[in-house]
Amino acid sequence: MEEIILTQDEFYLLNTIINGQGGFQSLQKKLLSQIDQQLKITLYEDDIERICRYIKDYGTGGAQTRFLNIFRNYLPCL
């Protein structure tokens, strides 16, 4: 388990409008539900694995780039 305090910019990137119902969207919704008032997010092992897998294995795109920009300074897999 990792606890990270997001910057306002990182929170803004994560809190973009969610369109669709795929894996990225469901992960985004889950992550948003794990953020407290101080912008501290709790990442569980399955969250970290999914974030890393989606960024590394699914090519480049809007969601991948957003996740990379949010988490690259915090997760060693990136």
Image (cartoon, grey):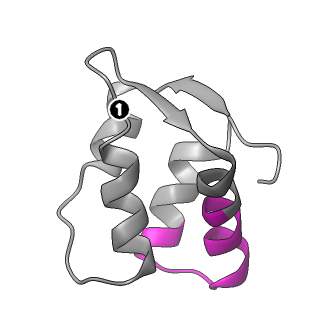
Q: Residue furthest top?
A: 38
Left/right placement of residue 32 relative to residue 77 reads left
Residue 63 in picture, x, y percent from top left: 43, 70
Residue 33 found in image quarter: top left
- For the C terminus, which image quadrant? bottom right
- 9 vs 45, nearest the viewer: 45
Residue at point 59%, 45% (across, down): 71
Left/right placement of residue 2 relative to residue 24 reads right
Q: How many numbered tags mark residues here?
A: 1
Residue at point 54%, 50% (across, down): 69
Residue 25 in picture, x, y percent from top left: 34, 71
**Which secondary structure class fits the magenta region best?**
helix
Residue 39 in picture, x, y percent from top left: 35, 23
Q: Is residue 42 above or below residue 21?
A: above
**Which amino acid does the dot numbered 1 rest on?**
Ile
| Residue 61 on the magenta segment | yes
Residue 68 found in image quarter: bottom right
| Magenta stretch bounds | 50-64
Secondary structure found at label 1: loop
- 24 vs 63, nearest the viewer: 24
Residue at point 68%, 35% (across, down): 74
Q: Which residue is mark 1?
A: 35
| Residue 53 on the magenta segment | yes
Residue at point 73%, 42% (across, down): 75
Left/right placement of residue 3 relative to residue 36 reads right
